Image (tube, rainbow, N blue to C red):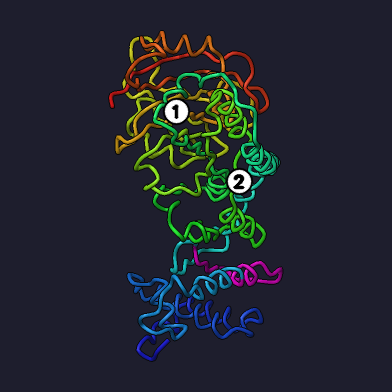
Amino acid sequence: MTDAEPKLRNDSRWQLIERIAASSSFQKSEHLRNLLRYLAERTLRGDTQDLNEHRIGIAVFGKPEDYSIVDDSSVRVNVRQLRLKLHEYFDADDRKETCVVEIPKGSYTAVFRSAEQKANSVEHTARRAQLAIRFLPWVLAAFFLVTTLQLGLHRVTKPSTVPPSWPLSSLFENGNQPVQVVVADANYGLIHLLSGQQVTLQQYLSPAYRSGETVAYEHMDKGEAQVLNYLSGSVLTSYADLAVTTTLMRLSGDARDRLAIRSARNLTPRDFDAGNFVLVGGPASNPWASYFQDRLNFQEREGAPGGSAACFENLHPKQGEQKSYCGLPFTGSSGVDFATIAYLPLPSGHGNALILQGLQQEGTEAAGVFLSDAANTRQLQSSLGISASSARPVYFEALIRTQSIAGAPMGTSSLVATRLLRP
């Protein structure tokens, strides 16, 4: 702070910053003290329009004007340490501050709020964390299963004489090109559940997401922040996706060696310039599903994570159809759930995509089970007025209804509605 800012000295928020900088937690790190003062001063002055990683590196850490934030991550590392030190300061049992300061993830602006607001937010986050615990055994089991499945795909197996089943067969018609099965990113859904934030596809693709910078941790304690940091950097999928992938392998017959399993985390928009894909999971767990949503009639609308049920909105209802179809409030509950099966061309026109998405994991798994029943596929073809031997690809979407009990689809799924899609 300079003498040109005399009013700042009398600001209770700046006085809080000075108390924090003088505390034992900050005494061993001049870098963190300077970083805290710089971010707080710029915030309190309202001068945050160019408060970015590059500018901080120059102003606080003495970096040259032409230094690269790609090669030098020291600012990100120190900001993460600052967040943890702030948590440590305010979590002290004898701390009597009436105001707290935080540096939200994805931002370098200091946020000041009353201690009472923080307490309420932490309690709310704890409830979200309890909901997320339900998913962790499934995710850990899926990690083991996906490793086993990948090893199985690389084994030398005896060729089958069974051709791929429709509609999967349509994806294998272009020579010997692989069909890429894109499984959901379980961490994407868990981070959304814990943080209460929706991550856009653009944010998901950014380097900041990989480093955890796009998630706001301001309401979380040190342990919760460490869990989310782990989730943002690891690659896991769900049991439902593994079940669907196993079904796809069986339905691919003698072409199954052309299936290539990929995580949603490892794709870029350029991958969809050409090729054939199966997307497993909806936008809440597989962000690539949102890449195609605006071309569908049945579009997913997400409810509050762990609270209200998600729904498929029927944009153009036909006679006898509902305007929306809502399913389970969260994975693991029992009741009716819905899923869609869609087959459509890539935006480039150089390939196709088959999308299997449920409102919850049970619905996604049910979509795979539906396609594994020949009677179901014949009913679907009849409803669409097509045959599996059609000379040209027929693009469509179908809405199915399923019954789930304790996290698993049970019984036979039923076809609710269909649409033919124009290329």
What mark, if any, has residue 416 been given in the picture?
A: none
* Residue 319 place in picture, x, y as percent: 34, 10
**Is disc 1 placed on a helix, strand or loop?**
helix
The picture quadrant where one finds residue 98 is bottom right
* Residue 317 place in picture, x, y as percent: 34, 17
The residues tagged by marks 2 and 1 sit, at their Cα atoms, a distance apart of: 27 Å
Q: Is residue 89 magenta?
A: yes
Q: Along the line of sight, which residue is nearer the eye, 325 or 123?
A: 325
- Which residue is drawn at the image coordinates 52% and 20% (left, top)? 163
- Which residue is drawn at the image coordinates 31% and 37% (left, top)? 347
Other residues around mark 1 within 10 Å, as few (<14) / some (14–19) / many (≥20): many
Circle nearer the viewer, 2 or 1 = 1
Q: Which residues are magenta?
A: 85-104
* Residue 312 place in picture, x, y as percent: 43, 27
**Is disc 2 placed on a helix, strand or loop?**
loop
* Residue 345 place in picture, x, y as percent: 34, 31
Q: Is residue 278 visible?
A: yes
- The kind of residue on which mark 2 rests is Leu
Residue picked out by circle 1: 172
Residue picked out by circle 2: 236
Residue lying furthest bottom in this view?
A: 3
Q: Is residue 139 visible?
A: no
The picture quadrant where one finds residue 23 is bottom right
**N-terminal of the two: label 2 or label 1?**
1
The picture quadrant where one finds residue 80 is bottom right
Residue 388, compared with residue 5, is above or below; it is above
Q: Along the line of sight, which residue is nearer the eye, 66 or 42?
A: 66
- The kind of residue on which mark 1 rests is Phe
In the rendered image, the quadrant that contains the N terminus is bottom left
Q: Is residue 413 magenta?
A: no
